[in-house]
Image (cartoon, rainbow, N blue to C red):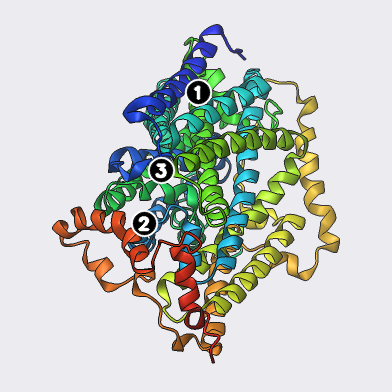
Amino acid sequence: MGRFTVWDYVVFAAMLLISAIIGIYYAFVGGGQKTSKDFLTAGRSMSALPVALSLTASFMSAVTVLGTPAEIYRYGAVFCIFAITYALVVLCSAEIFLPVFYKLGITSTYEYLELRFNKYLRLCGTVLFIIQTTLYTGIVIYAPALALNQVTGFDLWGAVVATGVVCTFYCTLGGLKAVVWTDVFQVGIMVAGFSSVIIRAVVVQEGIGHIVNDSYHGGRLNFWDFDPNPLQRHTFWTIVIGGTFTWTGIYGVNQSQVQRYIACKNRFHAKLSLYINLVGLWAILVCATLCGLALYSIYKDCDPWTANQVSALDQLMPYLVLDILQDFPGVPGLFVASAYSGTLSTVSSSINALAAVTVEDLIKPYFKSLSEKKLSRISMGMSLFYGGVCIAMAAVASLLGALLQAALSIFGMVGGPLLGLFALGILCSFANGIGAFVGLVSGFVISLWVGIGSQIYPPLPVRTKPLSLSIEGCNITSGNLTSTEIPLTTVFSTPGAERPALADNWYSLSYLYFSTLGTLVTVVVGIIISLLTGGLKQNTDRKFLLTKEDFLSNFSRSETEQPEKVEVLNWKPFTMADEGTDNPAFSHIEMDVASDKNKVNGLHI
């Protein structure tokens, strides 16, 4: 197999350099980042297209670039059903969550929890988000770097530190504007990397017909699996129902995504950005699927994983790139640049979101006298700090990879109950603070129970349905072939004896349903407890709920264009004026909560 040449490093370095230049440009253009609003929400001036591409980019980390094709190679194209899921997710995010967040003019999504319930729930949400995101960025930086390093010999820590430093650099200097515009550039690189692989694979296999034909005969085109059993890992229903809940937790209420569509200049642009982003998600899904089928078509007679050429499935893509593109100097470098673009875009949006949440939820409420200039400086400082934390987490991931992966999948279960919490607030006018809190806790307990159980007793192959791989066409000595076969059987057969009854039904639940379970438990328990604690007696301000007007305003274009923007910008000054801001000891939000306390929590029964 080929190794990396100078040209590949040049292409990679160019990608990092351009990202850094974009950061420098936005640090100084238009007078730089004067206020924390400029820094964290780009002064609410973005238009739909760059935001849409940015949403697509950060959804697509290097895990997608390397993992999805390998997933399709191993389990077949049933993964494509996610196309339906993405459509449902975008619909829910744009029509349920976006209108409420946008009209309130908030920077941190968790601010909503205080406005609607109380400040303790806001703190819960914030802390969970910070832990989950730092764990996630550690893995996102390290895992792909390791896979690329093992196949291509691309320097591991050089790449990790370079990407981490460049990322922190442009996040700290340019704020959200730099994050969005570097994402736009990086989406281009990702598509280019995918395209180079697909085009070359089609040439090598003499036409796309051959690839599809091989995939069909190899059982890889298993789109329609309507098995309603919730224990099967991927079927039509688990992907459409489970996937929708899992991804709505990310698109609808996760700070890193919400922060970007809130940065649009009016609500029409905000919604449009989500719908354009849907097209981007579909395009990426198609690219990844074609790569996965090409992988199968090329290696159908000699699977590099079984033949010990690669040690993990996520190394298949870099292996293929070196195999078919080694005669083209710089092109393997383009593919590596595309994988790292995935990392950069995900990490940069995480850093910016972490800074936003820290400033808005942990600093602003407690230090009221800070000037805008100081807040802007603090936001920059937080970006720098979290950049360092992310690189440190990558180092932790290198030492405790499996542990961190487990921690992440456990925190991934946080998404479900949080989605339930926001859904309660936005959709149920009678939900109160007590109901929301009890619902949140019970949602967690159930999710964690299933989640930790499935970590200890992984589901059997009957549930995950891996497809057959062959090594008949390999011309390698057969001495080392058994080494991957034996562990698999031992892993699954030894626990067989002591697997508890729960392991094969409750813990084998498809991972996509963890979120669904968390959301539904949170909502149901929340509604019951709220009704029992006098939720019907409270009168909730309509601006915290999804109203009929929010939905109808879709159809009157004139309404969504300008007035919305004016209302958003002037929302706070007016309420503040009513509540007497001469006394800096009172924040308008605290006043609001204090005056509503007896109603909101329904405690006056």
Q: Which residue shows up at 31% across the image and 50% down it?
A: 270
Q: Where is residue 207 in the image (x, y as percent from the top left)?
A: 37, 26
| Quadrant of the snapshot with the N terminus | top right
User: Compared with residue 387, is residue 10 higher up or lower down, i.e. above or below?
Assistant: above
Q: Disc number at residue 105?
A: 2
Q: Is residue 384 above or below residue 159?
A: below
Residue at 50%, 74% in the rendered image: 594
Q: How far apart are marks 3 and 2 (CA)?
A: 19 Å
Instruction: Name the one closer to the observer, 299 or 314.
Output: 314
Mark 3 or 2: in front is 2
Asked whether the residues under the numbered discs 3 and 2 touch, taking CB atoms below 8 Å apart as contact, a structural biologist would say no
Quarter of the view holding residue 416: bottom right
| SS under mark 1 | helix
Determine which residue is flagged by label 3. 55
- Specify whether 158 is left or right of 282: right
Depth check: 130 or 70 in front? 130
For mark 3, does the 10 Å Cα neighbourhood hold few (<14), some (14 to 19), or many (20 or more) residues?
Answer: many
Estimate the x, y position of residue 520 in percent, counting from the top left. Answer: 53, 72
Q: Earlier in the sequence, mark 1 or mark 3?
A: 3
> Could you say where residue 544 lies in the image, as x and y percent from the top left?
39, 69
The amino acid sitting under disc 2 is: Gly
For the C terminus, the image quarter is bottom right
Q: Residue at x 66, y 29 (%)?
A: 146
The quarter of the picture where residue 190 lies is top left
Q: Which of marks 3 and 2 is nearer the N terminus?
A: 3
Give the CA separation, mark 2 to mark 1: 36 Å
Foreground: disc 2 or disc 1: 2
Report the residue marked by disc 1: 337
Mark 3 lies on a secondary structure that is helix
